[in-house]
Every structure is written in C-alpha cells, then in structure tokens.
C-alpha cells in the first residue's frame, strides 16, 4: 500500500510576499505564491520542515490558504521562526523568542488539522509522522574539522544572524540543542516519517562547505539514530540545498524553497511512503 505526502521547508514567506496591511491586500499575493509552488496533484498531507517566515500573522494567512488545498498540515519550528526582527517584535514578545513560537503554535491550533510538532507523533492514514525543530550542535566542526566548541561559538556569534535575532534562548552551552535532541530520541523509533528543520546527517555535504566551519551551524549529529532508520523517511531543511538520497536504509529529503534571490521555480516535493 502506498501513502504519500507533500513536503517543503524554508519558505521564508515575507521574502516572497511583502508584509503589508490590510490583510485583504496581501491575500491574493499569498494565493499566487501558493499556486506557484503547488504540484499538479497535491496529496492529503503537507509537511513544512521549518522556517515559515518572520511574521506570525502572515504565516497564519499562508496556513489558512494552504488548508484550502491540504487536509492536514504538519509543521516544526525552524531557526527563523524564533527570530525577533524588529524592536516592535522585541516589545511584542517581551524579548523572548520562545513566546513567538508559542504564539505561532496557538495560531495553528485555530485551524483544524494543523499540527505543530514539537517532540510528538501524529498518525494520519496509518503513517506516523514525528517532528521536532532540533538545533545544530557544532558537532560537524568538532568531529570533522577538529575545532573546539569555544572557537565555533565565537564564529557563530560573529557570522550567524541567529546570534543577533534569537532572544533569550541560546546560552553559551547551547543546552537548547540538548533539549531538542532528547525530544528527537523519544520519537525516532516509532516514526515512519521524521521531520526536523536541521538535518542529522552531514554525509552529503560537498565542495567548499565540507571544509567550512560554518557548516557546523547547519547540521547536528544524528548518528546515534542511524541504526534505527530502516524504511523511514527523514525530512529536513535549513540548508537551502535540496537533497533526496538513501542512507542507513532511510530516505533523506530536503525540499527547501529558499529565498527568491536563490532562484525561483522550485515547487513542493511529493513523497511516496511505502508501507
Ligand atoms: Fe533555517
């Protein structure tokens, strides 16, 4: 029996549709945007593997419109979903990025069959989808390139927007990454489809990225799960490089959309789950 789902990540909606009031002005643009990425025959389930956009109320409009097409929508948090991009947003969320994510979760609850996964599993038509945002853990730079955690932290502080725009969450020890990993530990075994924003397998990193310490901020070490992935699908994003490959008996798929400046024409990807 074959059951499939549609997949996308890294939508970064506010880069595709300018945020403006009133809402009714923006709606037709969101509809056009959706039409530009929809496959010919959308399936019942859409998975969005993180990085929706910087404005929750705009994201909610997108979700509501997508719900006209999809019966179920599953999401996990991406790093950009934690961003507070203006002093207004800092005020609105009292300087706490987690408050923005919490609000987005609540906005999703208002729409039927929209599931914001955060260390839990949802079963739809016999397929178990388990999701959590997860966080990069610097392991790539430490294990593959021999950097110290301290050196990588300095680099992260220097080059990543995450260090400036995520507020009140990431301390020096990066305990958030450990908490997210624990959530993942609790769902991997049971899930047929694993959804994370940051990918747990860096084996396909190529070219200059292989030797760049910045790659440490795009993956985490998921190797403790590799022996348990037989016949599963692992959806991830964060890097705006698309991937679709088999490893450890599992299919890894990155169906990122990315920014308009990175190219247009990418669409939602369709996945068949064979059970
Ligand atoms: Fe991301």
Image (tube, rainbow, N blue to C red):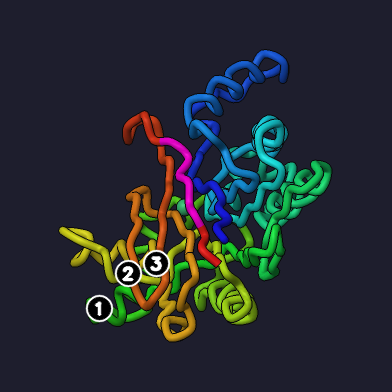
Quote the CA–CA distance across marks 3 and 2: 6 Å
Q: Quadrant of residue 111?
A: top right
Query: How far is disc 1 from disc 3 in space, using C-alphas?
Result: 12 Å
Q: Going from the N terminus, do you reach mark 1 or mark 3 first?
A: 1
Provide residue 56's location: percent of width, then percent of height: 68, 39
**Closer-to-camera residue (46/242):** 46
Q: Are marks 1 and 2 in contact (CB under 8 Å)?
A: yes
Residue sitting at x 27%, y 65%: 204
Instruction: Return the disc, 1 or 2, that comes first in the chain's sequence.
Output: 1
Q: Which residues are magenta?
A: 267-272
Q: Which mark is drawn over residue 165?
A: none
Residue at 48 percent across and 25 percent down: it is: 36
**Numbered circle sitting on residue 219:** 3
Density class for disc 1 (Cα within 10 Å; few <14, some 14-19, many ≥20) is few
Q: Quadrant of residue 130?
A: bottom right
Residue at which label 1 appears: 144
x, y percent for residue 189: 58, 81
Q: Is residue 121 above or below residue 173?
A: above
Residue 166 shows in this picture:
no
Out of 126 and 229, give the one closest to the viewer.
126
In what element is the residue under mark 1? Answer: helix
Please tell me whether residue 68 belongs to the stretch shown in magenta: no
Local packing at callout 2 (Cα closer than 10 Å; few below 14, some 14-19, many 20+) is: some
Where residue 202 is drawn, which disc sits there?
2
Q: Are marks 3 and 2 in contact (CB under 8 Å)?
A: yes
């Amino acid at each position: 029996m074959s059951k499939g789902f549609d997949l996308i990540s890294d939508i970064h909606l506010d880069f595709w549709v300018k945020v403006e009031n009133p809402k009714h002005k923006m709606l037709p643009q969101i509809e056009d945007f959706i039409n530009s990425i929809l496959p010919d025959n959308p399936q019942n389930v859409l998975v969005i593997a993180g990085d929706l956009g910087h404005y929750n109320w705009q994201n909610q409009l997108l979700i509501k419109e997508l719900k006209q097409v999809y019966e179920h929508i599953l999401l996990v948090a991406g790093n950009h979903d934690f961003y507070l991009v203006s002093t207004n947003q800092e005020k609105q969320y009292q300087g706490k990025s987690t408050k923005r994510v919490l609000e987005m979760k609540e906005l999703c609850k208002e729409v039927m069959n929209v599931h914001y996964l955060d260390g839990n599993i949802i079963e739809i038509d016999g397929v178990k989808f388990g999701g959590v945002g997860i966080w990069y853990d610097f392991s790539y730079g430490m294990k593959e390139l021999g950097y110290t955690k301290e050196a990588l932290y300095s680099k992260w502080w220097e080059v990543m927007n995450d260090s400036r725009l995520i507020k009140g969450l990431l301390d020096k020890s990066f305990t958030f990454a450990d908490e997210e990993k624990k959530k993942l530990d609790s769902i991997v075994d049971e899930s047929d489809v694993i959804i994370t924003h940051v990918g747990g397998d860096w084996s396909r990193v190529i070219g200059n990225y292989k030797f760049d310490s910045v790659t440490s901020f795009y993956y985490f070490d998921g190797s403790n799960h590799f022996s348990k992935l037989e016949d599963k699908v692992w959806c991830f994003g964060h890097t705006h490089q698309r991937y679709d490959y088999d490893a450890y008996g599992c299919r890894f798929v990155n169906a990122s959309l990315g920014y308009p400046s990175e190219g247009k024409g990418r669409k939602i990807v369709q996945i068949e789950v064979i059970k």
